[in-house]
Structure formats: structure tokens, C-alpha cells
Image (spheres, rainbow, N blue to C red):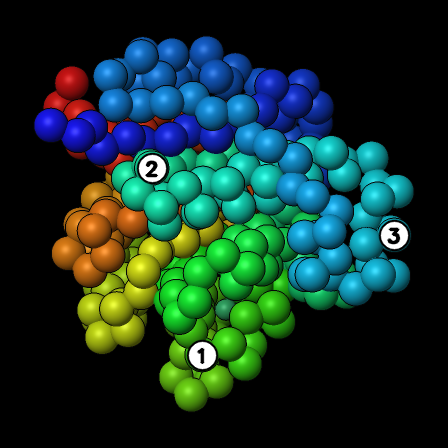
Amino acid sequence: MVLNITAVYFHELFNKKIWDIINNKFQNFPKVMESELNLKNVRLIEPPLISEELLLKVHTKEYFEYLKRRWDYLGARYTVGGCVDAAERIMKNEFHNALCFGVAAGHHAGPDNGWGGTYASVSGGIIANLEQKFTNFKIAILDTDSHHGNGTRAITFGKHNILHVCFCDTNKIEDNGTKICIDSGYSTNDTEYLSKVKNEFIRRVEEFQPDLIVHLLGHDTALGDYGSRGLSKNFFLELVKLVKNCAENVCDGKYLINTHGGSNIKICEYIHPRIIRILSNNINS
Ligand SMILES: [Zn+2]
Ligand SMILES: [Zn+2]
């Protein structure tokens, strides 16, 4: 029997610095997920650096020059590099799914700007790399960070093979129905939010039939974190179960999670080891 491998991308640099916005939430990683990393179908992968050539396919020359001078450039490069590698290897059936830890890169980075702790685009890197290696692929991006993914939206706008469903503060449908924003509400609860994910994301994914689901998973929405929408820590586990199940039904389980916002160390250390168990199917162990 072929093992379905869950890849966990983590670089030692991620626990050594105090990053913008998310602070030092990874200070106890990978130690806190030691027993999960020992599961027989889980692999810890050291993320490779994204090439500067690929970064230049996503960002303008001028912005790239700024990015290179930032103190957190290396962290951003490992983050994008890990996600790019994971997406490609999932598409090639080498890995079943992946949890990619990240710093300094993510959904607020657009072609010529970046802020809010994210300065290089993860989604942009994934897409630019797949464009070089695959034809006619489709990706569904789910953004459940508390804030609007302006950078991801700017980078994916006009690409109708990319479905981007972003849970933020407005209700909007644009770009031929492939770019969606959902107002998740400030004072919501687990059940309400999960039902919005079912109605607004899962339903669309079943119709869109992507080859891969990319999930930008911030826990800043948790009660006690800086972008709180009143969600419990167990919400994140239910969310991952829901999306994983959808991926199994729609795209042979091809599912990549990239960590996003949130700085609460307790929540961070609670959810990520459990997410690995869910991804690798060892939910009860
Ligand atoms: Zn956020
Ligand atoms: Zn949005």
C-alpha cells in the first residue's frame, strides 16, 4: 500500500526571531509537534529558498529591490520556497497534503507592495511555479485569516483558473465569479463561520473542480488573538476537517495549508500539532 504522506515544512530560522505581527509564536516549534512528526506518514521538510527569478515573476523589479533589503527577506524566501515546493510535490502526487509554516510572507503582499507582516506573496509564487510546469491547472485559494487578502487578490485578479474566496469584512463577487469576499462578521461563532465556509467555499469548490486547494489559515480570528472574531481554538480543527474532506472528494485530497496571522502562542501551539494529525488522518491518536 502506498502511504499518503503529509509534509510539514518548517525552517529553524522561523523560531529564532521576533517577526512582524506574528511575533515569536513559533519559538517552541518544531518541539511542540515532535510526536506528530514521528507519525509514520508525516515528513518534516526543510523549505528551500525561493529563487530570485521566481520572485521577479510575481513582484515588480522595484519592489523586489526593496524586499531584498528587508531584515526578514530570508524568512520570506524560505516561506514562499516551502509553499512552492509543497504545491509542486502535491501536484505530482509525491505528497498527499502539507502544512507549511510561514513568516514574513503571505496575503498582504501584492506585485508592488506588502504590509501587515507579509512582504512576499505565497500564492503568487505557487502560481508562477505551476504555470511553468503544468498546463490547464486550477487552484482554489481559501483565506480564513481575519483580514482581507488584498495582495493575493491583486495577484490572482484576471486569472480565471484561480478561485479566491476570502473571509473578511465585505460581501463581494468579482472577476467572473472567481474572486469572492465574504463578510464573516465581527462577533460570530464557530457554527456560524463553518456554515459560511460550507455555503460560500465548499459549494463553489465542488463546482469549480480545482486540482489543488490552498488554505491561508490565520488564527488571528481566535478569541484572545489580535483579530478576534470570537472563534474557539477547536474551530480551526473543525475547519481543517471540513476542507480536507472537501479536498478528498474533489481533488484526490490535494490540500496545502500555509500558516498566516495570529500571535497567540497558546493557540498556535494547540492547533498546529492537531492539524498535522487531521491531515495525516491520525485524528484519535
Ligand atoms: Zn490577519
Ligand atoms: Zn476579502
Q: Residues within 10 Å of mark 1 (few under 14, many from 20)?
A: some
Q: Residues within 10 Å of mark 3 (few under 14, many from 20)?
A: few
Along the viewing direction, whichever of 161 and 281 lies nearer the viewer: 161
Residue type at mark 1 is His
Q: CA distance from mark 1 to mark 2?
A: 27 Å
Residue 69 position within the rendered picture, expressed as x and y whole percent measured from the top left = 88, 42
Q: Element at badge 3?
A: helix
In the visual, does 278 lie left or right of 230? left
Instruction: Give the residue number, with chain letter if any, for mark 2.
Output: 94
Upstream in sequence: badge 1 or badge 3:
3
Mark 2 CB within 8 Å of ligand 1: no
Residue type at mark 3 is Glu
Instruction: Please state which of the two labelled residues, at mark 2 or mark 3, is closer to the viewer.
Output: 2
Up-down: is 68 above or below 284?
below
Instruction: Please state which of the two labelled residues, at mark 1 or mark 2, is closer to the viewer.
Output: 2
Q: Residues within 10 Å of mark 2 (few under 14, many from 20)?
A: some
Q: CA distance from mark 2 to mark 3?
A: 34 Å
Q: Is residue 103 visible?
A: no
Residue type at mark 2 is Glu
Instruction: Give the residue number, with chain letter if any, for mark 3.
Output: 65
Q: Element at badge 2?
A: loop
Q: Element at badge 1?
A: loop
Asked which quadrant contains residue 143, the reply is bottom left
Residue 6 position within the rendered picture, expressed as x and y whole percent measured from the top left = 31, 31
Upstream in sequence: badge 1 or badge 2:
2
Along the viewing direction, whichever of 134 and 24 lies nearer the viewer: 134
Residue in the picture at 20% in, 28% down: 3
Q: Which mark is residue 160?
A: 1
Which quarter of the rendered picture does the C terminus lie within? top left
